Amino acid sequence: MKILVCISNVPDTTSKINFTDNDTKFDTAGVQFVINPNDEFGLTRAMWFKEKQSATVHIVTVGDATVEPTMRKALAIGADEAIRVNAVPTDGFFVAQQLANIVKEGAYDLVIAGRESIDYNGGMVPGIMASLLDMNFVNTCISLDVDGTSATALREIDGGKEKLATSLPLIIGGQKGLVEESDLRIPNMRGIMMARQKKLTVIEPVDAINATQDTKFTKPAAKGAVKLATSVDELINLLHNEAKVI
Amino acid sequence: MSVLVYTESENGKFKKNAFEAASYAAEVAKQMGTTATAVSFNANENESLGNYGVSKVLNISNDKLTTFNAKAYASSIRQAVEKEGAKVIILSSSTDTKYLAPLLAGYLKAGYVPNVVAAPESTAPFTVKRTAFSNKGFAFSEISTEIKIVGVSNNSFGLHENKTTATVESFDAAVSDADFSTKSVEIDKVVGKATIADADIVVSAGRGMKGPENWGMIEELADVLGAATACSKPVSDLGWRPHGEHVGQTGKPVASNLYIAIGISGAIQHLAGVSSSKVKVVINSDPEAPFFKAADYGIVGDAFEVVPQLIEKLKEFKAQNA
């Protein structure tokens, strides 16, 4: 089985968010970039397929050269090869088209992407990719088993879970649950050393549309101080008469 | 060239988010000088969408589409878009619509903006405000494709009554076996309880509850309020509660009217997931808990003393205000 894991390079979850250039760009100064957490669950599941079912695992990232440290981390975790599409990821549709091209060229059986990146939260890349390639697709995937060309997936739904039967080739939008957080891997020294030797191919982007453009950013308005109630009666009164939510 | 809205239903009954999406579609239609048309699947009471400004409903009645199937639903909605010549498509932000919307975007070569929190800033260019960076910021996104898809964030636009007479038409969308290449085998869903996505009120608890055996009072408080239950990340990591209840940056986002956080200190990742909630209440014994800085109201106190009192007082309050 040939697996492609889509890796997004995102600000660390604790990053402070600021904007520059008259609030038109995300301020990357002082920000630590990491593998998108939803992608990290997918990468770890891909490692399981590699170890238990002899799968080959490639990773792909759309980005300029600044994303390579994150890609090397994914290689250090155990991916076999990496592909970088040399373009700044300006929009989900654009990224999906670039990735769809890689999937088509590489004839992958299984494509694992995070259900959304934690920066722009578009949640559209795996689904658009699936529609462009007419591949089977499971979103919010929290469990995946593959037997030959058959696949069984669990996905999270509002208020529960749904079990789905499908087949390869398949794209999933994965998340926490695909593997347990305690199973996530930290690269060890041997992995880091080996990652330096692994193949990282840079390819130029294909022609693609930019369907959307972020023209401006703002931050939520500063919040007033909390009102502390000294009794439960006072809290109920505030929620009923002032906030009007009960 | 109407604005098309996908209205979600379950067992024939429209969900609240269907009426919110319909309200939003009517507002967009008004701004664009056109009308709003809904597409529904096996829904009853289609005329009720007229209360929210929808003037036509295309109802798809097909036993194969009783259970949600992303590909088949996206394919059907695409046919409705083509029939109506719609240039703008509105959906909610439920888990199911976030599954089908990107497929629809790919089929239609349409720009898709999810998590939209307000009526369009303008319709030419088509610009909407959405949350980004896990609710730590907002982006103003311009959609440049001919067809535009907007996912409205739950509870952000609200329900806007705008009484219109909705005509209901049967719409026979063609679905093929290929549309069902991914099939639902089993659904395991809590029935009769509010879900985090739909609930007006969410009661959430953290490690301060000391163990899963103490969740009875959290569920009782949720029952009294008609609320959904949720939890912090460490609680789901410890296996005290299911992953589906984990709220935060890598869990579920909450956009309820009232969010009550009990024994949750307020890590930045958790706050990112709940910041879209309108009113946040914190109950915590530690007055320095970071959540107090993000909350609107709070009580500094032991959850094991405060929550039982809150349950009793709310029961009295409900009885008096019934």
Image (cartoon, coloured by chain):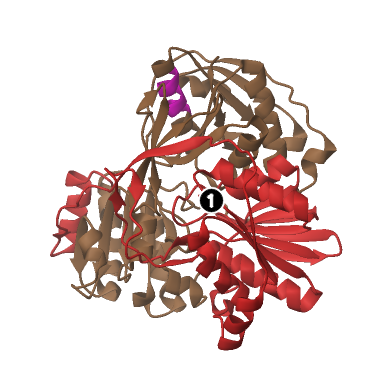
Q: Is residue B288 left or right of residue B139?
A: left
Question: x and y percent of residue A166 in the render?
Answer: 79, 53
Q: Quick one: B293 or A100, which is closer to the camera?
A: A100
Please give the name of the residue rendered at 78% of the width and 32% of the height, measured from the top-left corner. Answer: B175
Q: Colour of chain A?
A: red
Picture quadrant where residue B76 is located: top right
Name the quadrant of the N terminus of chain B.
top right
* Residue holding disc 1: B192
Whether residue B69 is visible here, answered yes or no, is no
B172, above or below A36, in the image: above
Residue lying farthest to the right in this orientation: A148
The answer to which quarter of the image holds residue B89 is top right
Nearer to me, A204 or A157? A204
Q: Amino acid at mark 1?
A: Gly
Q: Colour of chain B?
A: brown
At x 39%, y 67%, the residue is A32
Q: Is residue B266 visible?
A: yes
* Residue stretch in magenta: B22-29
Q: Quadrant of the C terminus of chain B?
A: top left
